[in-house]
Amino acid sequence: MAPKGASKREQLFTLYATNLSIYHPDVVDHFLCPLCLNLFSRAALRCDPPNVALAHVVPQSVGGRLCTLACRECDNRIGSAYDSHANREKSFVDWQRGTGTMPGRLKHKRGDIGVEMSLKDNGKGFQFLFIKGQWDPASISQFVEDAESDWSSLASSFTFRAYNSTKRDKSLLYSAFLMMFQEFGYEYVLSPNAHRVRQVIRDNRPLSDLGNRVFSLPEALSEFGRLPSVSILIEPRKFRSFIVALPSPKENEPARCLFLPGFGEDGKKAYECLLALAKPCDKFRARVLAHDLSHRLPLSQHKWFANRLWRNLR
């Protein structure tokens, strides 16, 4: 039986292999991982598990469906180190609004018990569900005794794995980078300015090394439509850069934005000017690009189309 997603992997492999050959004619029928830049032949799809993986632009664990490709090693490493914190944040937000449960531990006199905690009555009460295999009968008996004698102190002993916002932001940067790969292929991810972004993601460096920050969607840039999306900041011209808008788990935050550099020396300068700002300004104006530009990737007549878009869009 073919591995799950085999047809989609094959389709995307062909798409990106053709796109890579447009920019590097000497490389035929190979996939280049956008992060580690290692080359993979089509035989990598036949391994068990495949060495080239479907990479969700937004992590699947937080509801992402749009896929591109990355090598399995890079995608697994980033998923474990960073995407897990995006998932923990979503679990925490869902738990706070009373629509989800929070896995954790209840500590008591003879040990601890694995539970899932949910809020009830608009946060005025709570409920614990024991997790199968993470408790023993003796612990349950003691837990019941403790609960009957001092429920409030027992409830306060609930602990859970909190998310790290710095690592969550690295997950968002990876999502933004994959979105640019999905839309523009190797034209963008092999550009010199994109290499700065790749280094921060790949080399376990914080976003501060890039100078980047994650912004809530500014009111002046509120017309992003379906998420995730790519836009070009067109005014003021001196700040011209790409904007990737990603979904947020928070109800009062319509989207999260990351700015990514455009092309060439002028793109580098514009990006550095933009990152020097404390926050996006009200005078920003952006143009949202059409969704799914990837149909252009295998067509040689569209070589450098992302560069032309970035420079000429008004």
Image: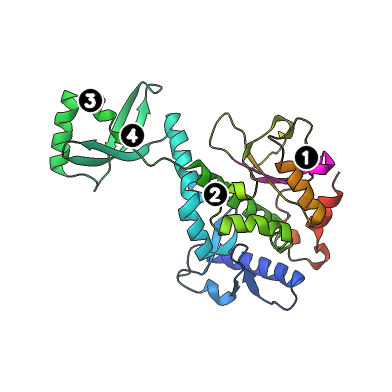
> CB of mark 3 within 8 Å of CB of mark 2?
no
Which SS class for mark 4? strand
Q: Mark 4 points at which residue?
A: 117
> CB of mark 1 within 8 Å of CB of mark 4?
no
Q: Mark 3 points at which residue?
A: 151
Mark 3: which amino acid?
Trp
Q: Name the residue under label 2.
A: 171
> Going from the N terminus, do you reach mark 3 or mark 1 first?
3
Q: Return the residue nearer the eye: 245 or 65.
A: 245
Residue 5 lies in magenta, yes or no?
no
> CB of mark 4 within 8 Å of CB of mark 2?
no
Q: Return the residue nearer the eye: 291 or 161.
A: 161
- Residue at point 26%, 37% (across, down): 106
- Residue at point 72%, 37% (across, down): 277
Spatial CA distance of label 1 from label 4 is 42 Å
Left/right placement of residue 110 relative to residue 5 reads left
Left/right placement of residue 109 relative to residue 69 reads left
Which SS class for mark 2? helix
Which SS class for mark 1? strand
Q: Nearer the viewer, mark 3 or mark 4?
A: 3
Residues rendered magenta in the picture: 228-247
Crowding at dot 3, Cα within 10 Å, few <14 / some 14-19 / many 20+, comes out as: few
Q: Return the residue nearer the eye: 221 or 296.
A: 221
Residue 203 is marked as none
- Residue at point 52%, 44% (across, down): 166
Spatial CA distance of label 3 from label 1 is 54 Å
Residue 286 is marked as 1
In which quadrant will I find the N terminus? bottom left
Crowding at dot 2, Cα within 10 Å, few <14 / some 14-19 / many 20+, comes out as: many
